[in-house]
Amino acid sequence: MTSLVSRVSKLVTNPLLASRPIVLFLVATGTLFGLSVGNTMTVPDVNLPILYGLARWDSGYYLGIATGGYGIFQHAYSFRPLFPLVLRTLYPAFFWLDVRSAEVAAGFLWNLVALGVAAVYLERLTKLLFGPTIASRALLLLAVYPSILFIATSLYYLETRRILLAGGLGFLAGLARPEAFLVAIPFLVKSLFEDQKLRKIAAGIGVLASVPAFAAYGYLQTGNLFVVLQSEVTGAKCTILCFVSNPVFYFANYVLPYTINLVVFIIAIVFVVYHLLRVNTSSRMFPYYLWAFVLLAIVFYSGELRSLARFALVVPPVFWAQAEYSMSHPRFFQALVIVYAVLMSLATILFVNWYPML
């Protein structure tokens, strides 16, 4: 009994999980006082006054795909299938609600569960790599800048030598986020200078297989093998090149989202590059910083500028680098926590669903 109480107490005091009541308060503030900024993909009004604030931006696509399939939106294949599958599985449990309200409630429930599991595995993984002090600092940073589930579990089992399980979880990550297939990079790079080479190569290929697997699904549904790629390429978005071509217009119309995303993304890039290039980065950590650099570089070049901060969520090395650096620069750590907390509060109140937990 004492052990169970200790585990529960440790879980609820985990900074990543303990911060969620604050986030929900901010969501409620933005929703109830009408502060949230509207957008083209808000979900039609549902009978969940506070949780409705969570159903914005890409939520409309995910909720629609969960019940209507990929054929109901023009660019639906830009979104991976795992989250819609979760929603489709869970929403019947809320049978007393209408379908759309039940979907929103199911998404809310899943996000809390996913966050709890991710918090446990991120703490274990970071302790394994850096020790308890840096783990605590990284989790505090993540508490004001949350991360995702399957990346954390995949990397944890990679480090604990359960390679094939890690590869399977990485495959699921690729079915949750378009850019998550790049987590194959640590598997493949580690195979060059660590043991279990064949297993790591096989697991890395398994992670990459999430891309052709979803392409094959798209082909079965549409007869077009490239429907996923075409959907992602032709979707409306403002990349860094688009922004540079007319910065005055975009900042004049979207000051806060561009500012928030650029600030946190530039901070992420600086720390990843610093730890990637420094001479004392260990061979154990180098593959992770290389993966983070490749991902951030691709997203910075081709990703939606207003979503840059969300893409950084799939790269725990960003927060490892910041937490490790802060060990010898405590004032920097305090300042970073304040900056992230302020930006997260603004983004949550004004835009609410600015990050997915999955």
Image (spheres, rainbow, N blue to C red):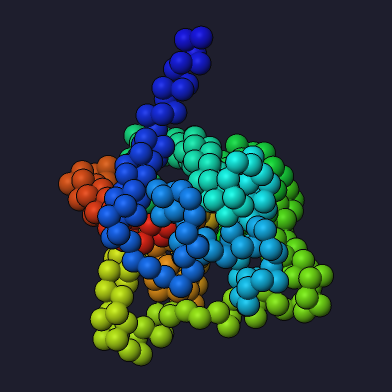
Residue at the image position 46 percent from the left and 22 percent from the top: 8
Name the foreground residue: 105 vs 185: 105
Is residue 14 visible to the viewer in this orientation of the structure?
yes
- Left or right, residue 325 beside residue 206: left
- Left or right, residue 15 beside residue 162: left
Q: Residue placed farthest to the left in the image? A: 331
Q: Is residue 313 above or below residue 293?
A: above
Residue 248, x across and y down, in percent = 26, 86
Q: Is residue 267 above or below residue 155?
A: below
Q: Residue placed farthest to the top in the image? A: 1
Residue at the image position 32 percent from the left and 44 percent from the top: 25
Q: Is residue 121 above or below residue 339?
A: above
Residue at the image position 58 percent from the left and 45 percent from the top: 97
Residue at the image position 47 percent from the left and 65 percent from the top: 42
Name the foreground residue: 195 vs 55: 55
Is residue 292 visible to the viewer in this orientation of the structure?
no
